[in-house]
Image (cartoon, helix red, strand yellow):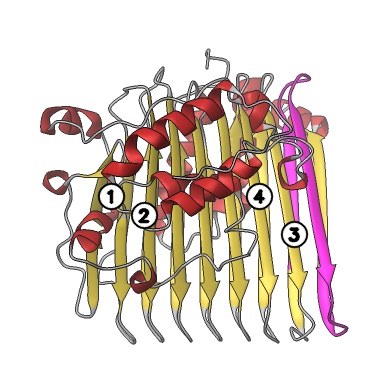
Amino acid sequence: MNLVVTPDRRRTKAEEALESAFRRIDAELPDLEREAAFARFAAQGLPHRRVEAYHFTDLRSMLASAPEPVGRPSPEAARDALGADVFAAVNPARAVFVDGWFVAALSDLTGLGDGVSVSTLAAALTAGETIDGLGARVAPGTAAETDPLVSLVCAFFSDGLVVRIADGAALARPLEIRHVATGTAASVFVRHFVEVGAGASATILESHESPEGSVVHAHTLVEASIGVKAAVTWVDRQRESHDGARFSTLAVAIGDHAKLDHTVATLGAKIARTQIFATLGAHADLATRGATLAKGRTHADATLVVEHTGPGATSRELYKSAVDDEATSVFQGRITVHKAAQQTDGRMGAHAVLLSDRAEAKAKPELEIFADDVACAHGATVAEIDETLKFYLMSRGIPADETERLLIHAFLGEVTDAIGDEAIRTAIEGEIDGWIDARGKTA
């Protein structure tokens, strides 16, 4: 094994721990280009503020250490980790991963409909499938493939889900990919492949959670392709321990005339970074929205890279943050319109409300346009709660705490109101209400 380590800098303890772990487990796992992926990571190391994409999220200084990957949990530990499901009222099919490993006994993959195939990545590889044969892949040389967090998942992943929806088929039930943790200090790496055929449709839910007080560094990578004229709704809820870290990447190719409606709610983790790398074909439609709620001394980063490659496509990006105590929220978004992508319509907005004079919000929306017939715009705002509105509500007998609760909920409502399914919308609103009600408690 030839690991490439940049010679002109000193490795951190976290980088040394990751290299040691990789040397230990590399021989135990199928090759699958793992060494090449780890070499890409080792050549860069953990990203720092001089790396533009991580300017506001300096992982080299933030990550003092990296816990060891762990093996498959016992059935008893997996069952104890499960807890209540935030999407229970939706009655979805479920694929449950505990500490990064699929647990069949806790999952329910029945009733998904004709033309739908769901298997585990471990099973697919055991059956002799290759990564190339699994469908959607991060394209070589792209911003996603060269991202250090993506490289880590590609080097370390132990399991994941392979979802294939045939042309013209539809998921008969929403499919939830649920990630939970036993609470053991661990680095967890999961890689999913989702392939939605032409004219197909699906609703996919993601849920990420770990016990409060646990130190889990959770890394997930979803590689997805959405075929011509297909339609996908995707809702992602992340609520990790305030002592842990969550690094989540969605790399998606949206085909011609296809549509992706995406919502993410981030409500926890000491360090959280959610990345979306999206490529849009001709007349494709992307709507992605985010609600970030940060308190204590947490750091939450939402980063988008949207590439318009075909003409006539539409993208809408709206991310809102409520930031309390000494927490920090970060939004970085870039829309790139390629020369062939004439008549692109792209709009990006990032808005934050600061609930404390020590809270901080940073936003960097960007447009990179190489076509000459486009309608693109971006904007960002950072503000405190409107004191005039607060006074108006309080003057009508509403207590101060309830006034702030109503105003925060209304601020984030533009994100949640756009979720079409009532049961899913109610579940996400309930999570937000719980966070607001817990304000002031120690994180």
Q: Identify residue for label 1.
A: 89
Which contiguous range is marked in magenta?
Answer: 347-376
Q: Three-letter amino acid code at disc 3?
A: Arg
Q: Determine the secondary structure under disc 1.
A: helix
The residue under label 2 is 423
Q: Tell me which numbered mark, 1 or 2, is placed earlier along the sequence.
A: 1
| Viewer-proximal residue among 301 and 288 | 301
Q: Nearer the viewer, mark 3 or mark 1?
A: 3
Marks 2 and 3 sit apart, C-alpha to C-alpha, by 32 Å
Image-based side of 319 in relation to 135, left or right: right
Query: Are circles 2 and 3 on residues that touch, CB within 8 Å?
Result: no
Residue 86 percent coordinates (x, y): 34, 42
Between circles 2 and 4, the one closer to the viewer is: 4
Front-most of 154 and 73?
A: 154
Q: Which of 30 and 313 is in front in this view?
A: 30
Q: Nearer the viewer, mark 2 or mark 3?
A: 3
Looking at the image, which residue is at 61% across and 71% down?
Answer: 279
Q: Is disc 1 in contact with disc 2, using a CB cutoff of under 8 Å?
A: yes
Q: Position of residue 344 (x, y in %)?
A: 75, 80
The alpha-carbon separation of the residues under discs 4 and 3 comes to 8 Å
Residue 28, percent across and down? Answer: 27, 42
Helix, strand or loop status at disc 2: helix
Asked which quadrant contains residue 109, the reply is bottom left
Which residue is tagged 3? Answer: 334
Q: Was residue 366 drawn as part of the magenta stretch in this picture?
A: yes
